[in-house]
Image (cartoon, coloured by chain):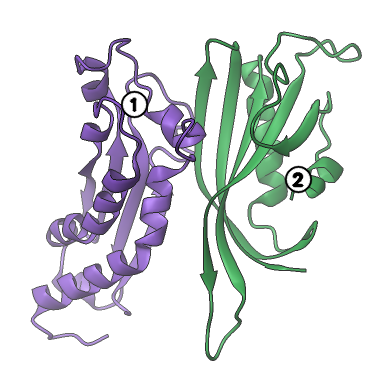
């Protein structure tokens, strides 16, 4: 497909390498419109397609995330982070304020990053990352299908 | 990769060790200072998070796409970050032999920082995406 470039990156990345309690962890999918397509479509139109395209990664993360009380699993979500003229960013996230406030979370701390980066006694680390990586082909295919539907087949690959 | 990091990480003080997970009990965690530098001792663990085989009918085959996670552990937060910076300089955008692997390309995925209050140790994390074959 010649009209988007899709990249995967950490939330915050190198710009904000530190995190404070309550910052959710996760991965971002960025889609850049390139070539002629950016003259007819906007980031605002692409964002809902990205949300739909990321559903397989979301479902995979929900299926793989370790569940004891379900408090952290319930915070797995897709969020639109950034929309610009020819760019949109959607993130698959877990944890954060919602987890800290959940009554099932007795200590009130955001332990989701510890699960993601160090795993648990029964689950290896990298649940979110793994979900994004193994569904990446499907996600890209959905972005392509979504854009094609939006364009009504006006622009070919 | 562990051998490569052991051989090429020029750090002062040298980490107590570079190895696979889990972090050995007490390693990098206890507030023990290195005699020569008077800095807290440190440790590095390496693990593979995700891997996907790549096959092609017309291009290169037998490549593996891996996400590697390197954890730099130290009671001193700055020391943990310094180790991570050195690891990133060694591995990101690197291509060529790394121990028993031929790295075709590598790119940064994300950084993160955790603090283990039980062991009083900072964990400075980097994840790197690598495409590799066995050398």
Task: Residue at 40%, 20% (x, y): give it.
Answer: A20
Q: Is residue B34 left or right of residue B60?
A: right
Q: Mark 1 lies on which chain?
A: A
Task: Residue at 70%, 19% (x, y): give it.
Answer: B25
- Residue B30, placed above or below residue B132: above
Q: In this view, does A11 lie to the left or right of A99?
A: right
Which residue has dot 2 on it? Answer: B2
Q: In this view, does A152 lie to the left or right of B62?
A: left
Q: Distance between the residues labelled 2 and 1?
A: 31 Å
- Residue A70, placed above or below residue A40: above
- Residue A128, placed above or below residue A121: below
Residue at the limit of the structure toward the right, as seen here: B36
Residue B98: x, y in percent?
Answer: 77, 57
Q: Say which quadrant the C terminus of chain B sits in.
A: bottom right
| Colour green belongs to chain | B
* Foreground of the two, B24 or A82: B24
Residue A63: x, y in percent?
Answer: 29, 47
* Foreground of the two, A44 or A129: A129
* Colour representing chain A: purple
Question: Does residue B5 appear anywhere in the picture?
Answer: yes
Q: Is residue B100 left or right of residue A148?
A: right
Question: Does residue A33 appear anywhere in the picture?
Answer: no
Local SS, label 1: loop
Residue A98: x, y in percent?
Answer: 21, 24
Which residue has dot 1 on it? Answer: A23
* Foreground of the two, B75 or B77: B75
Labels 2 and 1 share a subunit = no
Q: Mark 2 lies on which chain?
A: B
């Amino acid at each position: 497909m010649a009209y988007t470039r899709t990249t995967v990156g950490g939330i915050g990345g190198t710009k904000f390498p530190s995190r404070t309690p309550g910052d959710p962890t996760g991965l971002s999918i960025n889609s850049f419109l390139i070539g002629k397509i950016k003259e007819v479509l906007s980031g605002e139109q692409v964002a809902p397609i990205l949300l739909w395209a990321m559903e397989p990664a979301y479902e995979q993360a929900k299926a793989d995330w370790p569940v004891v009380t379900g408090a952290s699993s319930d915070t797995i979500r897709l969020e639109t982070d950034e929309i610009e003229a020819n760019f949109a960013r959607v993130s698959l996230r877990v944890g954060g304020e919602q987890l800290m406030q959940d009554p099932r979370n007795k200590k009130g701390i955001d332990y989701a990053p510890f699960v993601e980066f160090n795993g648990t006694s029964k689950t290896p680390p990298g649940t979110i990352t793994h979900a994004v990586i193994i569904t990446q082909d499907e996600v890209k295919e959905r972005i392509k299908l979504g854009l094609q539907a939006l364009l009504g087949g006006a622009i070919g690959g | 990769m562990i051998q490569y990091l052991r051989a090429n990480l020029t750090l002062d003080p040298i980490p107590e060790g570079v190895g696979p997970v889990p972090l050995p009990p007490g390693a990098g965690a206890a507030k023990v200072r290195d005699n020569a530098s008077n800095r807290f001792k440190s440790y590095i663990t390496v693990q593979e998070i995700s891997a996907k085989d790549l096959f092609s009918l017309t291009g290169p085959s037998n490549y593996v796409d891996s996400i590697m996670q390197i954890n730099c552990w130290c009671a001193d937060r700055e020391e943990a970050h310094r180790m991570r910076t050195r690891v990133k300089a060694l591995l990101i955008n690197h291509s060529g032999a790394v121990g028993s692997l031929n790295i075709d390309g590598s790119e940064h995925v994300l950084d993160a920082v955790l603090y283990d209050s039980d062991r009083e140790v900072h964990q400075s994390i980097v994840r790197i995406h690598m495409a590799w074959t066995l050398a």
